[in-house]
Image: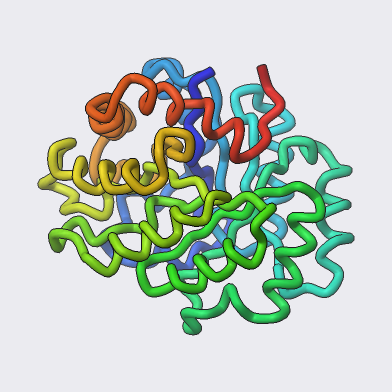
């Protein structure tokens, strides 16, 4: 099964997305739903997808679970909950008992938007993560280079938990890269319980001036660090549309992964996502 492990749905007319206010994001400031994604998946040979959190609202998580319940190709939801809530365990149990609750596979918070680079290490956040892992859920790191030390410490603090690094921690591709990013990615990968999504890279490059060749050094570094069993493909649709079409994004990442070997490509397009998120689909 070929899985797109990172895509989004949203409707700015019905909810507020603070990160979407920037003028350059106007092209994607419109509704995107399952009916928009379905033909793109079919055209690009993708069997299933995982829909990922866009805003810090429990209502969105509940909506995504309802969508997953009604949409066969959505095989997983990475939602949002308040990790600092002392009653988080009850919230998670309620979500899992409701429509689509069996498709709740992970949780994410927009950590790179927090003022504190060590937000992940707060006692109340660590308590919340404990509640997640007690229910066998995966946690997605949405961090940049600045927050990677806290992500490393968190992965080390929960050695039996599963973590997924979104967008390879958003390397500064447009500016030519960063030794600090590269070193910290290597340190995070040394934690054997972290997978890395090869997603969102084109939008970290110059949107109107990128290609697979320019993305490849960053994909290669992630592959060297995480190995073929911990790389995961994600389109980051519809954010990716800022830089290219679904087919262009998928084709570029596929070309990068193929250069690393057929086994790397095959595992990144499904096998590894099933392992990281404990997907139960055939």
Q: Residue at x 32, y 30 (%)?
A: 250
Q: Residue 222: x, y in percent?
A: 33, 47
Q: In this rendered view, identify the residue nearer to me: 248 or 256.
A: 256
Which residue in the rendered view is the most extreme toward the left?
209
Which of these two is toward me, 39 or 30?
A: 39
Residue at the image position 50 percent from the left and 55 percent from the top: 12
Say if residue 60 shows up in the picture.
no
Residue with the most extreme bottom position: 116
Name the quarter where the N terminus is drawn. Answer: top right
With respect to residue 180, does 8 lie above or below?
A: above
Residue 240, percent from left and from top: 33, 43
279 vs 218: above or below? above
Q: Quadrant of the C terminus?
A: top right
Residue 126 picture location, percent across and down? 69, 72
The residue lying toward the viewer, choosing from 183 and 95, is 183
Residue displayed at 37% across by 42% down: 198
The answer to which image quadrant residue 244 occupies is top left
Looking at the rendering, which quadrant does residue 19 occupy?
bottom left
Image-quadrant location for residue 92: bottom right
From the viewer's side, name the closer residue of 25 and 84: 84
Left or right: 39, with 170 as reference point:
right
Q: In the rendered image of this protein, does residue 186 appear above or below residue 1? A: below
The colour scheme is rainbow
Which residue is drawn at the image coordinates 37% and 28% (left, top)?
264
The location of residue 34, given as percent across then percent down, is 55, 31
């Amino acid at each position: 099964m070929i899985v797109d492990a990172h895509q989004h749905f949203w409707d700015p007319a019905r909810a507020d997305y603070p990160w979407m206010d920037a003028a350059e994001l106007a092209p994607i400031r419109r509704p995107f739903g399952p009916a928009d994604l379905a033909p793109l998946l079919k055209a690009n040979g993708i069997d299933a997808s995982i829909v990922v959190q866009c805003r810090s609202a429990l209502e969105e998580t509940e909506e995504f679970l309802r969508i997953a319940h009604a949409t066969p190709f959505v095989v997983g939801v990475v939602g949002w909950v308040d990790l600092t809530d002392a009653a988080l365990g009850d919230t998670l149990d309620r979500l899992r008992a409701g429509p689509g609750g069996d498709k709740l596979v992970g949780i994410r918070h927009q950590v790179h938007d927090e003022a504190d680079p060590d937000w992940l290490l707060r006692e109340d956040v660590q308590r919340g993560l404990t509640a997640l892992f007690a229910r066998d859920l995966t946690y997605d790191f949405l961090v940049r280079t600045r927050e990677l030390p806290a992500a490393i410490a968190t992965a080390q603090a929960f050695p039996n938990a599963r973590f997924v690094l979104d967008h390879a921690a958003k390397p500064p591709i447009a500016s030519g890269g960063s030794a600090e990013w590269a070193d910290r990615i290597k340190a995070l990968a040394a934690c054997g319980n972290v997978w890395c999504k090869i997603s969102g890279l084109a939008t970290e490059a110059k949107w109107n001036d990128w290609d697979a060749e320019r993305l490849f050094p960053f994909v290669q570094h992630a592959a060297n660090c995480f190995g073929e069993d911990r790389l995961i493909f994600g389109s980051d649709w519809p954010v990716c549309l800022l830089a290219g079409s679904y087919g262009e994004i998928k084709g570029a990442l596929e070309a990068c992964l193929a250069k690393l070997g057929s086994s790397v490509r095959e595992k990144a397009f499904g096998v590894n996502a099933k392992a990281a998120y404990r997907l139960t689909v055939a």
